[in-house]
Image: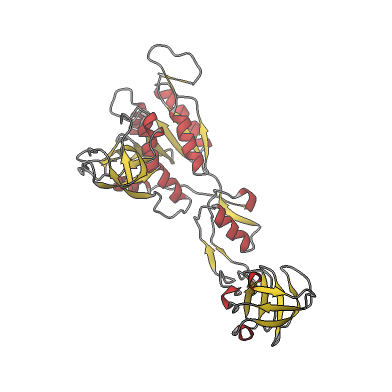
């Protein structure tokens, strides 16, 4: 076991543990947000034929060099229309719709706005030089056989659209990981129950379940576990049977009743305990009977931050997603931000655009138990150990 490791080292150690992901094929309608399990090659050229990017007339470019010029209309090319193939010869033009095939002999398009058609529909007056650039060439976007969607890609709307363009009605994706979530502590009650002295509402499992869903995984929330080694052992064993990953919340610090730490020391396999980040320094990572387990702190902000910095990138990499996994932007500080001497400092800040550019302000109390500070924020500072930042200084922040 390694103790009090840097953030970089913690990320390295998590990579030593992996899970086996199964694959399934699903229809495009159900694939939003999933992760591609195999790279895909295009089944077709895109576009599959030369076509027009404008409504207008297909012409020979040479015929339009000295406008205005009068050309004979020989027919119309429409997208998906079944008709005799048109051939444009000298002095001729074919009416054409956006996306329609380019007639043989034509090599340019004149926009309809720059034409006048005779009342009998047999002639068109060309008022400007036609544009060869208005023709979309076969395969100019993507050639058949080219790998365009890579394993691990998150299937966003534009990637799903590309999969359809490439000819795939269904695609291979990783099955959703099942993530067990167990909060610990005698003081925890479910929202809506009556609180007695010393009791609080359990909130971490709900927040963590949301974070898990954002990764298109399946959260399994278990009832809060009382401070009992036997009950905790039973809960962990149940999670092993039902889930691919275990998240616990609370019980990882140095106290007598921090039972997640205690049971992992005695019966589990710990890869590291404690990480040099603030907030969120107490986490444990290892395996329980072969299943990866992230022991997150009990303070709500800490549990969210640790998930963001450690658990989230690990889950994404299990699904083949390539980093970076965070969006980091520079902003100017409106207040001093004190950094700890040996830890990455991840303060909650609100960033917004001002006359001075993008600025960041700490608007709420920064206690690790103050979940409202995360609600009010939209970014985390990303200060290296010992790098206290002053008002007006530009620093990096992680967008939430």
* Rendered image quadrant of residue 59: bottom right
Residue ID at (32%, 44%): 359
Q: Residue furthest top?
A: 197
Residue at 51% x, 58% y: name it. 151
Which quarter of the rendered picture does the C terminus lie within?
top left
| Residue for point 51% across, 52% down | 154
In this rendering, is residue 323 above or below 281? below
Position of 313 with respect to 222 (left or right) is: left
Answer with left or right where residue 254 lies relative to residue 132.
Answer: left
Nearest the viewer among 99 and 312 is: 99
Q: Nearer the viewer, residue 328 or 78?
A: 78
Q: Quadrant of the N terminus?
A: top left
- How many marks overall? 0
Name the side, left or right, on which 73 lies relative to 342.
right
Q: Position of residue 93 (x, y in %)?
A: 70, 80
Q: Nearer the viewer, residue 386 or 219?
A: 386
User: Could you say where residue 308 lies in the image, as x and y percent from the top left?
Assistant: 39, 41
Q: Among all residues in the image, which is located at the extreme bottom?
A: 90
Colour setting:
secondary structure
Any part of residue 236 in sight? no
Above-or-below relation of 264 to 194? below
Residue 190 seen from this side = yes
Residue 262 at what x, y percent from top left?
33, 29
């Amino acid at each position: 076991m390694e103790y009090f490791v840097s953030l970089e080292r913690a990320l390295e150690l998590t990579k030593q543990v992996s899970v086996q992901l199964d694959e399934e094929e699903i229809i495009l309608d159900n694939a939003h947000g999933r992760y591609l399990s195999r790279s895909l090659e295009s089944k077709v050229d895109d576009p599959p034929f030369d076509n027009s990017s404008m409504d207008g007339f297909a012409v020979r470019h040479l015929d339009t060099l000295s406008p205005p010029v009068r050309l004979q209309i020989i027919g119309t090319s429409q997208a998906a229309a079944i008709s005799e193939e048109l051939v444009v010869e000298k002095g001729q033009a074919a009416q054409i719709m956006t996306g329609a095939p380019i007639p043989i002999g034509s090599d340019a398009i004149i926009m309809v706005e720059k034409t006048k058609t005779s009342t009998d529909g047999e002639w068109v007056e060309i008022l400007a030089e036609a544009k060869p650039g208005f023709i979309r060439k076969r395969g100019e976007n993507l050639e058949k056989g080219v790998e365009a969607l890579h394993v691990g890609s998150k299937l966003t709307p534009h990637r799903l659209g590309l999969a359809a363009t490439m000819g795939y009605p269904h695609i291979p994706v990783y099955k959703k990981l099942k993530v067990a979530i167990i909060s610990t502590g005698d003081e925890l009650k479910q929202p809506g129950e009556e609180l007695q002295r010393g009791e609080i509402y359990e909130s971490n499992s709900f927040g963590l379940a949301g974070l898990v869903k954002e990764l298109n995984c399946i959260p399994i929330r278990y009832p809060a576990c009382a401070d009992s080694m036997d009950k905790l052992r039973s809960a962990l064993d149940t999670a092993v049977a039902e889930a691919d990953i275990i998240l616990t919340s609370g019980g990882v610090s140095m106290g007598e009743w921090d039972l997640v730490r205690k049971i992992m020391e005695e019966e589990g396999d710990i890869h590291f305990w404690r990480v040099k980040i603030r907030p969120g320094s107490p986490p444990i990572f290892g395996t329980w009977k072969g299943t990866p387990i992230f022991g997150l702190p009990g303070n709500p902000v800490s549990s969210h931050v640790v998930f963001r910095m450690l658990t989230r990138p690990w889950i994404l990499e299990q699904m083949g997603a390539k980093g970076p996994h965070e969006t980091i932007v520079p902003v100017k500080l409106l207040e001093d931000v004190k950094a700890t001497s040996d830890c990455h400092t991840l303060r909650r800040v609100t960033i917004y655009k001002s006359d001075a550019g993008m600025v960041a302000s700490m608007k709420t109390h920064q206690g690790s138990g103050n979940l409202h500070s995360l609600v009010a924020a939209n970014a985390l500072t990303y200060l290296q150990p010992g790098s206290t930042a002053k008002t007006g200084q530009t620093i990096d922040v992680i967008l939430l």
